[in-house]
Image (spheres, grey):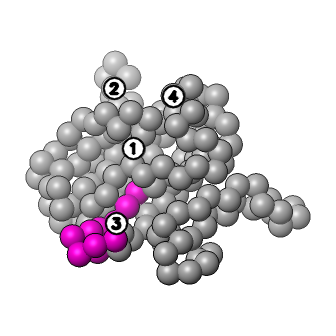
Amino acid sequence: ASRDSTSSEVVVKWASDGSDHVVARGAFVPFYYYWSPSGARVSYLTTHATDEVRSRSVSLDVVRAFEDSAAGKSLNELLGEGRTVHLQDSAPLYYAHSPRDNRIVAHLGDKSKVVAFEPATLSEVVLSTRPGNFRAPAWVPTQGPGGKEMCL
């Protein structure tokens, strides 16, 4: 729920009694939420509106709702509970969480690339520099030869 035109909140509530579990404050109103497969983090898209150049950009941000033992120390430290962390920005921006680890695959439209990246370090592997228009990337549910991950 937005408090004013320059701030917003992402609130994770307990369904049993309606109490707040995590409240994360950010500068922009989120419009698309997506839970990580572990259920520990929620990522979301917001619109940038800080200047003319970024007025049409979309921001991918993440907030930790629960400790994630599989995430590793660096990601848990980066994502303190209730802390919003900016990961990427672009327009259009489509993304998906890996079903097996912390990585995210993202189509960064105005940067003309599809990348797989690690949120804790933002280290990325460029998968394509010819992603086309409005393609939503996805992880292949099964692993390839030798346990290699695949995206489309």
Q: CA distance from mark 2 to mark 3?
A: 30 Å
Instruction: Name the side, left or right, on which 122 lies relative to 75.
Output: left
Q: Of the residues shown, which amino acid type is indicated by label 4?
A: Ser
| Residue bearing the label numbered 3 | 58
Mark toward the viewer: 3 or 1: 3
Q: Choose the circle earlier in sequence order: 2 or 4.
A: 4
Mark 2 or 3 closer to N-term?
Answer: 3
Q: Which residues are magenta?
A: 50-60
Confirm whether the magenta stretch covers residue 46: no
- Residue where numbered disc 1 is placed: 104
Q: Please give the label number shown on residue 74.
A: 4
- Answer above or below: position of 44 versus 98: below
Disc 2 designates what residue? Answer: 148
Dot 3 amino acid type: Val
Frontmost of labels 1 and 2 is 1
The correct choice, above or below, for 59 with respect to 28 in the image is above
Q: Amino acid at mark 1?
A: Ile
Q: Earlier in the sequence, mark 3 or mark 1?
A: 3
Q: Secondary structure at mark 3?
A: strand
- The image shows a total of numbered marks equal to 4
Mark 2 lies on a secondary structure that is loop
- Find the residue positioned furthest to the right: 17
Q: Of circles 2 and 4, which is in front?
A: 4
Neighbor class of circle 3 (other Cα within 10 Å; few <14, some 14-19, many 20+) is many
Which residue corresponds to the image point at 42% horizontal and 39% vertical from the top-left?
119
